């Protein structure tokens, strides 16, 4: 048991990295929660329309995350080695790739907006107007498309800062952005201080302005402190990247990029399977996801800590220390999330009551939250396992571990249970979530074998 528990210095190191990420994600998700509640006060159709679009944009966001993560495997180890030229080239790769991805995202979401939104609109128990939900979703999407590029640029800069263990600046930028978002949401959704009542359009405008604000703050800080961020010096003088590095990033990073895209699209398809049971399921799932994201910040931040700490140790060839540290990090994440899950379960019956929606939607939301609370430790273990494997460049394994699992196991289960069984949607959701226990077993075996103990920037 002792090998899973660190000393005071260990937890201080972890929390210095994790707390800024928790604060940034926590504030972001808290404002998303307020945004969601505000839209939820307007009506079920508005809330459902926004939820559908956010699910689609989530796929784009994860594609960007996949791109920056693939290159960050090298950026983190380059930093551990003290190679700033290598970091600069990884940064260039991220910028070029993310701009291209943004163009593809805008093309798909704009060009196929009707088809994509319609996938999620089905009659259930008769609650809500699906035509109204479609129109609200379309209004929201058209405005949100303008936020894709600043989001991508923010992620490129933030991820590079995190490679160096600098998590405070992205946190501050996130705090400012979400404060702006929160204030503008209140003003524009409800038409306060003389502003027009814009509803879902107001929520979208507020989000777009906040994304630009966050991007400007991070980019400006990095360039004004170039001496402390050596990767940015001369980064835009040329976009030439050594062919060997591009090849390495594509070999190691491509599975990760494809993984994020397939995993996110897989989540969108699973949500579409649930939507077969009616608009009230979309609304209930939206409420549940909003509060779940607030609690998920713990294992997400600790996963980021795994990527940074273990990546730097591997880059410095400290294999024994990396193995010992990783065991402590995973244990800390799982134990933390047991307590977080208990708190979440207590909140489950109370949170949905805030929304101005039907009793059926509130009932579904509370039960979805209970299921999410039960599965919190499972998610913590799989998340930490994923980042452990990724930090050692085992991206083919993470591809199989993550997105292939979703497409081969989770999606078929959700598809058949929603269409060909009489099980209540709560039971369907529980079964689909508990399937991740299989991933826990696989992750445990792979980490125990030490297949991830590899320096990829020798």
Image (tube, rainbow, N blue to C red):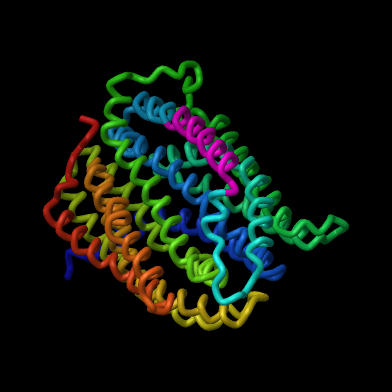
Vertical comparison of 164 with 372: above or below: above
Q: Residue at x 37, y 51 (%)?
A: 263
Vertical comparison of 169 with 381: above or below: above
Q: Residue at x 31, y 32 (%)?
A: 78
Vertical comparison of 339 with 33: above or below: below
Taking depth in this image into account, of 138 and 200 the one nearest to the observer is 138
Quadrant assignment for the C terminus: top left
Residue at far right of view: 194
Main SS of the magenta part reads helix
Taking depth in this image into account, of 343 and 190 the one nearest to the observer is 190
Tell me if residue 347 can be seen. no
**Quadrant of res 258:** top left
- x%, y% of residue 74? 31, 34
- x%, y% of residue 175? 59, 53
Residue at far left of view: 449
**Quadrant of res 209:** top right
- x%, y% of residue 86? 34, 26
Taking depth in this image into account, of 234 and 125 the one nearest to the observer is 125
- x%, y% of residue 121? 56, 61
**Quadrant of res 413:** bottom left
Q: Residue at x 60, y 41 (%)?
A: 110
Q: Which residues are magenta?
A: 94-114
Taking depth in this image into account, of 333 and 104 the one nearest to the observer is 104
Q: Is residue 102 magenta?
A: yes
Residue at far front of view: 420
Q: Is residue 134 magenta?
A: no
């Amino acid at each position: 048991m002792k090998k899973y528990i660190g000393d005071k210095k260990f937890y201080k190191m972890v929390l210095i990295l994790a707390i800024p990420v928790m604060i940034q994600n926590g504030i972001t998700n808290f404002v998303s929660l307020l945004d969601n509640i505000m839209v939820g006060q307007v009506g079920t159709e508005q809330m459902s329309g926004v939820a559908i679009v956010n699910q689609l944009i989530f796929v784009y966001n994860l594609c960007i995350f996949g791109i920056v993560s693939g290159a960050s495997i090298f950026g983190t180890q380059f930093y551990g080695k003290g190679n700033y030229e290598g970091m600069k080239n990884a940064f260039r790769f991220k910028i070029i790739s993310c701009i291209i991805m943004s163009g593809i995202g805008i093309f798909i979401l704009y060009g196929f907006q009707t088809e994509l939104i319609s996938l999620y609109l089905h009659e259930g128990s008769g609650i809500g107007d699906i035509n109204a939900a479609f129109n609200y979703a379309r209004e929201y999407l058209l405005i949100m498309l303008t936020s894709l590029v600043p989001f991508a640029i923010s992620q490129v800069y933030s991820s590079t800062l995190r490679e160096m263990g600098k998590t405070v600046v992205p946190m501050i930028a996130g705090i400012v952005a979400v404060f702006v978002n929160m204030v503008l949401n209140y003003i524009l959704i409800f038409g306060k201080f003389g502003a027009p009542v814009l509803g879902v359009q107001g929520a979208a405008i507020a989000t777009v302005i906040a994304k630009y604000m966050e991007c400007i703050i991070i980019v400006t800080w990095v360039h004004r402190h170039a001496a402390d961020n050596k990767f940015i010096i001369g980064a835009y003088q040329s976009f030439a990247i050594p062919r060997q590095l591009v090849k390495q990033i594509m070999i190691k990073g491509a599975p990760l990029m494809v993984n994020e895209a397939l995993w996110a699209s897989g989540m969108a398809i699973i949500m579409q399977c649930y939507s077969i049971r009616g608009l009230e399921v979309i609304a209930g799932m939206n409420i549940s996801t909003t509060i779940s994201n607030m609690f998920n910040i713990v294992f997400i931040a600790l996963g980021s800590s795994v990527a940074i700490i273990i990546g730097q140790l591997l880059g410095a060839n400290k294999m024994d220390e990396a193995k010992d540290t990783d065991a402590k990090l995973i244990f800390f994440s799982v134990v933390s999330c047991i307590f977080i899950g208990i708190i979440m379960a207590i909140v489950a019956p109370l949170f949905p009551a805030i929304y101005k929606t039907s009793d059926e939607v509130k009932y579904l939301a509370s039960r979805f939250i209970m299921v999410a609370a039960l599965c919190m430790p499972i998610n913590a273990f799989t998340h930490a396992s994923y980042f452990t494997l990724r930090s050692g460049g085992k991206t083919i394994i993470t591809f199989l571990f993550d997105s292939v699992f979703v497409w081969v196991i989770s999606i078929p289960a959700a598809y058949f249970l929603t269409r060909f069984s009489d099980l209540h949607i709560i039971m369907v959701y529980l079964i689909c979530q508990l399937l991740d226990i299989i991933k826990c077993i696989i992750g445990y075996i792979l980490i125990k074998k030490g297949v991830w103990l590899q320096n990829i920037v020798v």
